[in-house]
Image (cartoon, rainbow, N blue to C red):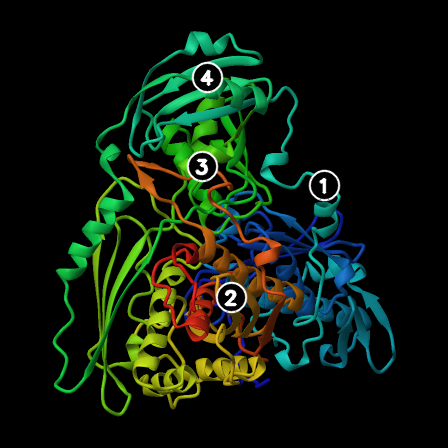
Amino acid sequence: MSSASPSPAPTLDRRSFLKVSALAGGGLLVGTYFRFGSSTAMAQTLPAASGTFNPNVFISIAPSGAVTLIAPNSEMGQGAKTALPMIIAEELDVSWDKVTITQGDLNPAYGRQSAVGSGSTPGNYGPLRQAGATARAMLIEAAAQTWNVPARDCTTENGTVIHQASGRRLTYGELAAKAATLPVPTDVALKDPKDFKLLGTRVPGVDNEKIVTGQALYGIDQRLPGMVYAAYVKCPVFGGKAGDANLDEVKKLPGVLDAFVLNGITGLTSGVAVVADSTWHAFKAAEKLKVQWDQGPGVTQSSVDMAKQAESLGKAAPAPALPSGVKAVEAAYHYPFLAHATLEPQNCTALFKGGVMEMWCPSQVPGSGQRLVTQGLGLAAHDVVVHVTRLGGGFGRRGSNEFSLEVATIAKKMEGTPVKLTWSREHDFAHDNYRSNGWHFLQGGVDGAGQLVALHDSFVKMTGGPGDMAGGGFPFNAVPGSQVQSSKLTGSVPTGYWRAPGDNGNTWATQSFVDELAHAAGRDPLDFTLGLLAAVPGADSPGGPAGGRGGRGGGFAPPKMVTVLKLATEKAGWGKKLPRGQGQGLAVTHTNNAYVAIVADVTVSPQGVLKIQKLTAAVDAGQIINLSSAEAQVQGAMLDGLSAAWFQKITIEGGAAAQANFNDYPVLRMENSPPAVEVHFIKSLAPPTGLGEPGLPAAAPAVCNAIFAATGKRIRTLPFTDTDLKWA
């Protein structure tokens, strides 16, 4: 594997501060205060309770020597709850077995609390290193003063300060109280990443034992004394409103405590609430509801009509005429709406008492839920207390927090009684914020030398979603004069962020089309893609921003993409001669500032049965924090992408989702999973990039391109199951 050049050490800008104070019991507390900027680093000492700045993270060192990190970001399986304390332990030079982490509740003192865009670890990497290094420097100074020796003669090891000349030692716990009285150093040395001992190793998740033993971690696990259970029923047609309902009849059903219609509350979708003594009774009673729905204009929407509109819009934005003698290559790619289908359905628990709304919420953006509640119910922010639980899957779905307002509205009506709202699986499918459908009407021009000289994408998607986020990156930045023209369908289907927003669909279409262009040019897809990368402005630069958007999270560095592409194809044995029915395909993506190349090996029987034999991924995601978690994230993202591309779609009929559960929205199962999934990381000392999402976008096009190599058949509509793969 190759190595990248080390990046400059992270610093805090002039609006970023360290807060140090003594803990009750004689410990040391270090808090990092930061806002994004590029000014010179600065630190200053603050009174323990000044409240002047908003810390985003805290480290505490107890007299016992134990180090605790309060995590501001939600944990939903990507491993942030383990990665963040690993960063602290590394820079602080403390044994991993002495570090614990607790989940922070929603609190303005912690700064921006969101787990989106694969940003938890990259966003905290610099501040946590700085805080750890500052605490370590203060502990060394406390020891030096105790021994009356120069601080430069002291070093640290496993939570202990050592005076090298005399061999004297003091633990961090023994030094914590004295260190808390010292001024904060304004300039501390961070470890050279080449000296890291913990980062890049394999560390088990801190919650693993609790998960496998079934301890209550998730929102759906919450139990409070005297708690009641709620279901909330909304119109199946998007945008519909509730009218009269058979409430008196429903209230007589077993276990039902109350039932009522909710209308006219800011931010709350109209519906009917059922409150019962168990979730089961609430669900069963909800099935008996008979509501007079005002379906509204949304009832006329259908996927069939959307496709017709998309074709018209695509034709209305035609590609420019090609130069004389240039071969035109045209194709239309379509992907459907997708549900998030999190394993844990949407849920939230709330208690309204004494004017305060207390909530237990599995949310990626808990502040969003708090805002919905304050605006909808007229409460002050300080009167809405949000406890953040572990999430049973997010993928962007739990950035939307409508379930928070739903349960809060019910809890306010049931004042003094805790209420737990759970969505049924059918409700979860019917009222998702779906990944938008999309159409790419693509045209490329290939000259007589097999070079791509023109590229155009007429892109159509549903209004209101983020599906067009990544338009204009690679390969468009490799072709002068290329264009992406976007048009939008109108309608009431709710759309939102879905894992690797924008890239998840756009990369499939564009990377599949790159393979089409390569074959039209009579060139090997690897050679063709390397040629495109060489044509991107700045391709001869070692890694600075270049050409166009290049993916979310920063500029596009062609050399990094070349490196991962060459590594993936080398490890996969690219170019071997294969019999018909077997094929290899490749695809690349730049997502959340990570560079990913994937090679897929597949077989397709003459009867059209697809088997993915192997996926080989190469990834440049900067410094890897936890190798075990990093591998799992890339593997899981690839399989998630294949699950969606192979089997899943949401279609709209009569203004409502036609799919209601996993029986008609299947997920990837063991018999379809590739028996071999390899992940190779580029060794890098650069700060970490996002990693929870970048493994997803290139998996589907790599498989589609391999299917073409095996059968000569192109998949231009997702899911795969919509294409007959039989060949003779």
Mark sitting earlier along the chain (4/3): 4
Residue nearest the viewer, comparing 561 with 372: 561
Q: Secondary structure at mark 2?
A: loop
What's the distance in space between the residues labelled 4 and 1, CA to CA? 33 Å
Amino acid carrying mark 1 in the image: Gly
Give the CA distance from mark 4 to mark 2: 48 Å
- Location of the C terminus by quadrant is bottom left
Q: Earlier in the sequence, mark 4 or mark 1?
A: 1
Mark 1 or 2, which is nearer the eye?
Answer: 2
Which quarter of the picture shows residue 472?
bottom left
Q: Secondary structure at mark 3?
A: loop
Residue 688: x and y in percent read 54, 70
**Residue to which mark 1 is pinned:** 214
| Camera sees residue 495 | yes
- The residue depicted at 45 percent of the width and 33 percent of the height is 427
In percent of the image, x 26 and y 45: which residue is there?
A: 304
The first of marks 3 and 2 along the sequence is 2
**Would residue 306 be found to the left or right of residue 726 on screen?**
left
Q: Are the residues flagged by discs 1 and 2 in contact, CB closer than 8 Å? A: no
Mark 4, residue position: 288
- Mark 1, secondary structure of its residue: loop
Q: Quadrant of residue 500?
A: bottom left
Q: Earlier in the sequence, mark 4 or mark 2?
A: 4
- What is the number of the mark on residue 534? none
